[in-house]
Amino acid sequence: MMATKQAQTLINDSYRTVLIQLKSNSISLFRIQQTHGHILKTGHSNDTHLITNLLSLYSKNHRISDATHLLNSITDPDILSFSTLISSCSISRHFNEALLLFRQMLNHGILPDNVVTPSALKACAGLLALKIGRQIHSLVKVCGFQSDSFVQSSLIDMYVKCGEIKDAHMLFDRMGHRNVVSSSVLIAGYARQGYFDEAKKLFNEMRDSGVEPNLITWNGLIAGFNHNGLASESVALLHKMHSEGFKPDGTSISSVLPMIGQLEDLKVGVQLHSYVIKQGLGADKWVVSALIDMYGKCGCASELLQVFKEMAHTDVGSCNALVCGLSRNGRIADALEMFRQFKNQGIKLNIVSWTSMIASCTQNGKDVEALELFGEMQVAGVKPNSVTIPCILPACANIAALMRGKAAHCFSLRRDIFYDVYVGTALIDMYAKCGKLGDARICFDRMTTRNLVSWNAMMGGYAMHGKGQEAIEVFELMKKDGEKPNFISFTCILSACSQSGLAEEGWNYFKSMSLDYGIEARIEHYACMITLLGRSGRIEEAYSVVKTIPFEPDACIWGALLSFCKVHGNVRLGEIAANKLFKLEPDNPGNYVLLSNIYATKGLWKEVNRVRDTMKRMGLRKNPGYSWIELKDKVHTLLAGDRTHPQSIQILERLDKLKLEMVKSGYVADTALVLKDVEEQDKEHFLCGHSEKLAVGLGLLNTPPGTTLLVIKNLRICGDCHVVIKFISNFERREIFVRDTNRFHHFKNGVCSCGDLW
């Protein structure tokens, strides 16, 4: 008898120990597991109070599997046990687990109550599981607590988030007592879906019924306006909220700041920043990220850096905002340096971080760096998505990194994102710019959904390659498909006509633009028409068109005219165009170089020297010629006159051998293209160092006979290089693509696709 009493005392002591441990707020996972062991040892595994507390602790520590295992070990669980775990799963956004537990509860014959149901409905809303949500709604009716305000608000929230706004409103209308929660949910739903009049009407009705809005109501309305890009309305709503005595919180401020940035209203932005400091919201990471974003959009790079430095704790959101802000303000080098620092500091960069940095590099001419980051991202275990791929593909296109582009294409197929319209469109553009027009068309034909950008990309690809008839076919197919062309569509088709010499077709489309579609001609359309006339040598007629333009011609127009004055050696109009350009773009060395070219072709060396002296006096230098070629998955960059490449000696030797073969064939270097009044022999030396020739030479050295070469140049290809590469294509039996700033030149069998007019 004595032993039995001692044993009971020991059990009671253990029971009290377990309860003390369970009530500890800072209990560790080890202590939770230790407590679980105590429960099993003391025989209290069916004690509802203990089990419920233990389930709650497991859930709070995100040990859902342990909690589920514990629940399954109970022979006769009650609704409180299920409710605790379902609620914890819902709060921690383990929505699938919450609904599985809810189904398990029903299988035990336990009907839901007004406590567990809102948690299950939240899971449905999170998963957009409308069908299950409707089933739970039916259960609510059967169980007889459909009039519970908390349950009703949860049902409304579920229907709103699942896109069934009408069902939500019907339920709201049937409510006997509408509270601020249900009203706020419905108002936010209407605002987010763009039904602003309905949202405002409900807002006013709520007030008329005696229910005053709270912060959640205001924030829901502001967030809805924000989501739909209504910047001015969002800012006005915040002002109204504040004027009526409601203090905006971190959610309000972080919602409106990006809209202020969009409006570039720095004055209001600074006022909100002051409010943030006064209200002590500076520790809110969402507010800080929004402040950085706002200053970035307002062009205040130093201010956004200051806000970042004053942060108590750096998080990935603020890092992303900082990188984007610096990039937006042209400080791409600083953005890249900061990104590297964040990476080295161990900050867990996410897909948004990597994609933003890659996009920034691509948009700011850092294509090689973008490709390097793309590789680093994958090594870091971050998988690209349907946003990342369209950001990296332009970098592949810009420097003709075809193998990298193909790798991104394969990745999109493996990840089943190829059929995303933005991915497909980026692939069309990449293949076209890498000289693979056939592959671009295959991607275009395989797209299940096309938008106007897709059609324009395909037409733009054909235009770049001088395939006018093919571009016209796509344009007509687009119209049959019901897609209405925009001004970019007409830029593509007019460019295609001008590059292919389709004068009649070009003029017909130019007239159709305004007559049939109501699109007024822009600068780029007139530039295409100047090019169309210039290709055929109708320079005076082109100048007449310039004089009829209904607005002041810009550098694009005069530049097109100047280019063809150079091609056809028209000094008089060349001087007129150049003088216009000197006023419009006084710091652009290219315009002075073109005028020098015109004088040089006529042997007017005194005028050439005068232009060169002007450039020297103004501190202007001719932009260096660069060319890129991809060999064995590596992109090589060659500069005009480059002697730094490891194979530079072999390249020049190969070019010298080709030169001898050309001389035997009667080739004479076009020395008129050299802008220096030097001996003819020296002029030929200058021409040998052009970057596109060096790139072709490198390609010949490092690829098997018959391999197609693709070279990208940052300037327009010169006439002598054009003649040389035509010869090489025939002598070496190679297809050679050269993409300059104007178009693609497809060299094959000694002929170029441009017809020697570019």
Image (cartoon, rainbow, N blue to C red):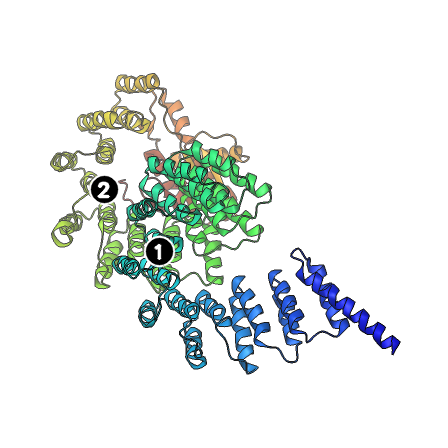
Q: Of the residues shown, which amino acid type is indicated by label 2?
A: Glu
Quadrant of the rendered image containing residue 722: top left
Amino acid found under the numbered disc labelled 1: Pro
In this orientation, which residue lies closer to the viewer: 217 or 428? 217
Q: Is residue 541 left or right of residue 694?
A: left
The foreground one among 542 and 113 is: 113
Give the x, y percent position of residue 419.
40, 62
**Can you see residue 715?**
yes
Residue 724 appears in view: no
**Residue at x-position 57% and y-position 68%:** 84
Q: Quadrant of the C terminus?
A: top left
* SS assignment at label 2: helix
Q: Which residue is outermost to the right?
A: 2
**Which residue: 31% across, 41% down?**
263
Cα–Cα span, label 2 and label 1:
52 Å
Nearer to the camera, 689 or 148? 148
Residue 625: x and y, percent?
40, 32
Residue appearing at x 35%, y 68% in the figure: 177
- The secondary element bearing badge 1 is classed as loop
Image check: 3 left or right of 556?
Answer: right
Q: Position of residue 284 (x, y in %)?
A: 49, 45
Q: Which residue is mark 2?
A: 524
Residue sitting farthest toward the bottom: 109
x%, y% of residue 577? Answer: 20, 29
Q: Height in image: 732 above or below 24?
A: above
Label 2 or label 1, whichever lies nearer to me, is 1
Of the pair 387 and 156, the residue shown nearer to us: 156
**Quadrant placement of the N terminus:** bottom right
Query: Sequence-wise, which precedes: disc 2 or disc 1?
Result: 1
Q: Which residue is mark 1?
A: 213
Q: Residues within 10 Å of mark 1 (few under 14, many from 20)?
A: some
